[in-house]
Structures are given as structure tokens and as C-alpha cells.
Image: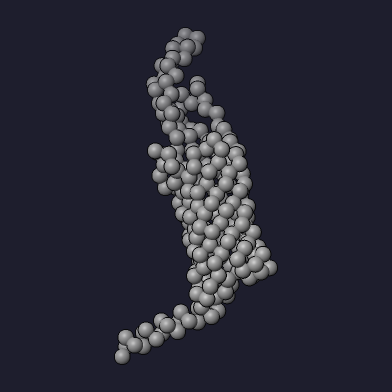
Amino acid sequence: MNSVAAKTAVFLGLLSTAVFAQDLGKGHFELRASGGINESSSPTGSPFPSYQIGAAFSLSRFFALTADYTRDYLRRTEIPDCTGEVVEPGRVIVIPCINDEFRNRINEFMGGFRFSVPNRSPITPHLQFSLGAVRQTTEPYSTNTTASIYNPFIGSTLTEFAFAPGAGIDYKISHHFGIGIDANLVKANRMTGFYHVMGGVFFRF
């Protein structure tokens, strides 16, 4: 008896969710915040955190224009540095070999479109394609203070055109609120490609 009651309650809950949850209708806006990981396709790639905020404007139940900003934290880069000797008046300073370390950050500014597959269930799959600019910033620092003084590092920035195909699934909890998971590949000129896997929340109005 308890089993029948539990199954009935679950069915009614899913039914009510399907009734009140709606897809992004024509002329409506969406705000989304997500967090997850990114991983490079290079041999030294490993998961690091990514954060994203985005917006969408629906042209129909199927198509929406999108705009996103993503902040990626990437693996540190280590480069061997053997400066050798530094000669000063009256003394010679011997600097041991060290590994210069660089912290890498990426800012993505992307815009594109999303194609959704609306249906009667609260689950909506979608495909997304974005274009824009990717800016990589390399911030140097050293594990050897003496070497840093006599052989200082110079940071660098690199901005490139990029594209990002992706896909995801949204679960609509209520008329205006839901959760989703997305995955996409980011490829820019002169940069190693990497992908995101992120989950987040969205609000529609």
C-alpha cells in the first residue's frame, strides 16, 4: 500500500512539473550562471575551474541568441631557467637552475545562437554554437627570489578569434527557474583547444 502511494506521489509531482515548466518562449529573456571544469587537450592538461555568466533572447521556441562571458583558470606552465653567473663589482653571484612558473588565465567573450528541442517534458536538450574573442593572460612568478631580481620574467597576453560548438540539457523546475548542464569545445588560433563541462541555474522572464 505504501509503495502504491509513493509511486502515485512521484507521478503527480512529475506531472505538475511538466505542466508548470515551460520552454523559453518567443520574445523572452534568460539569465544563466554556471560553474565547472575545463581541460586542455595537451599532454599536461588536467581539470581546472571555469565560471560563466550568460544571457539569451529567444527568437522562437526553437532558436535563441546568446551572449556569454567565461573565466578559465588553466594549468601552471614551468620552463627551466639556468641563468648561470651574475658578475657585480667585487663579487660573482652564482644562480642555480630553477623552474620559472607561469599562471595562465583565459577570458572568453562569445556570442552565438542556441537551437532547442522543446517538448512536453521538463527536460529540453539543445545545441549551441558561439563565436568571439579569447584572451589569454600569462602571469609570471618564480620560486627563486635571487633569480627573479637578476632575470625578471615578463608577462604576456594573447587575444585570438575563437569558436565553440557545444550541447546541453536543461531541466525546468518551475515556470521561470531551472537547472542545466552544458559541454563545449573552445578552439582559438595559436592556442591549444580545451573543453568545458559546467552545470548551473537559469532564470527566465
Task: Please name the residue shown 45% across and 43% down the image.
Answer: 40
Question: In screen coordinates, is 57 left or right of 49?
Answer: right
The answer to whether 141 is drawn above or below residue 202 in the figure is: above
Q: Where is residue 156 drawn, in percent x and y?
A: 57, 32
* Total residue callouts: 0
Of all residues shown, which one is farthest toward the bottom? 1
Can residue 164 be seen here? The reply is yes
Q: Residue at x 51, y 78 (%)?
A: 18
Residue toward you, 167 or 179: 167
Task: Examine the rendered structure and indicate whether residue 78 appears above or below residue 116.
Answer: above
Farthest top residue in view: 90
Q: Is residue 11 above or below residue 143?
A: below
Quadrant in the rendering for residue 97: top left
Q: Which corner quadrant holds the C terminus?
A: bottom right
User: On the rendered image, what quadrant is the N terminus found in?
Assistant: bottom left
Residue 172: horizontal and vertical position, in percent? 52, 71
Write the residue at 44% across / 19% down: 83
Residue 81 horizontal/vertical position (percent): 43, 24
Q: What residue sits 65% from the left and 63% below the top?
A: 57
Q: Is residue 50 above or below residue 63?
A: above
The colour scheme applied to this rendered structure is one colour
Q: Is residue 51 visible?
A: no
Q: Looking at the picture, how far across and down is residue 101, in whole percent?
A: 45, 33
Residue 11 appears in which quarter of the rendering? Answer: bottom left
Between 21 and 112, the one lying in front of the other is 112
